[in-house]
Amino acid sequence: MKKRMMLIINPMAGRSGYKTGFGEVMNILDSGGYLTTVYFTQGRGDATVFAAQHAAEYDTVACIGGDGTLSEVVSGLMQVPNPPPLGYIPMGTTNDVASTLGLPKNATDAALRIVTGTPTAFDVGSFGEQSFFTYVAAFGAFTAVSYETPQNEKQALGHLAYVLEAMGRLNAIDHYCAHVEYDGG
């Protein structure tokens, strides 16, 4: 009997490259014993809602997208009492999380890792009880850059789009004071 996989796809992530190799990814998942149901996001927050509402129905949840898509899926899974394992096929603009965790950035290699690999633990941080992050918690001058960089510029320029957006904000930098608490400190 096949295992059930929920695959959440952000079709706007990166340069919208999820279509490249998509058939091969689906074949790998199928050959690996998964019956895969695909959910396409249409806007910010969709991946969180999909994961929170439906993850308990599946043996595994995976996503195709960038760091933001992964973060949304994790936020949804954090709302599920016993969340299933999470697979990640990085197809975003920068894929910093995949780089940091040493995960494959090639879609077919990532799919093979989901099917045959060993799970990798990673920390999830939170702001309060309902706001989670997987990689970076930021505040200050450039927080909005990743959210407000136009999608068409990210698709055309990749990481450079973020740099250009940040450079345009240099003259508007404000100062902030902060107090940070962490386990053991």
Image: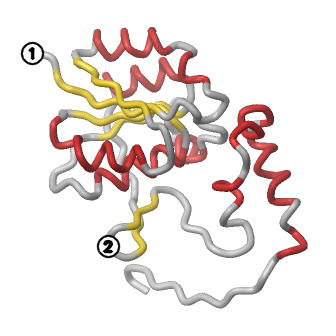
Q: Position of residue 134 (x, y in %)?
A: 46, 56
Give me the disc on residue 129.
Answer: 2
Relative to 9, residue 25 above or below: above
Number of other residues with Cα within 10 Å of mark 1, as a class: few under 14, some 14 to 19, many 20 or more? few
Number of other residues with Cα within 10 Å of mark 2, as a class: few under 14, some 14 to 19, many 20 or more? few
Q: For numbered disc 1, what is the local secondary structure?
A: loop
Left or right of 169? Residue 103 is left
Q: Amino acid at mark 2?
A: Glu
Q: Position of residue 20 (x, y in %)?
A: 57, 15
Q: Quadrant of residue 172?
A: bottom right
User: What residue is disc 1 on?
Assistant: 1
Quarter that holds the N terminus:
top left
Q: Amino acid at mark 1?
A: Met
Relative to 120, residue 109 above or below: above
Considering only order in the chain, which callout, 2 or 1, is on the residue closer to the N terminus? 1
Name which residue lies at 58% across and 42% down.
99
Q: Position of residue 124 (x, y in %)?
A: 39, 60
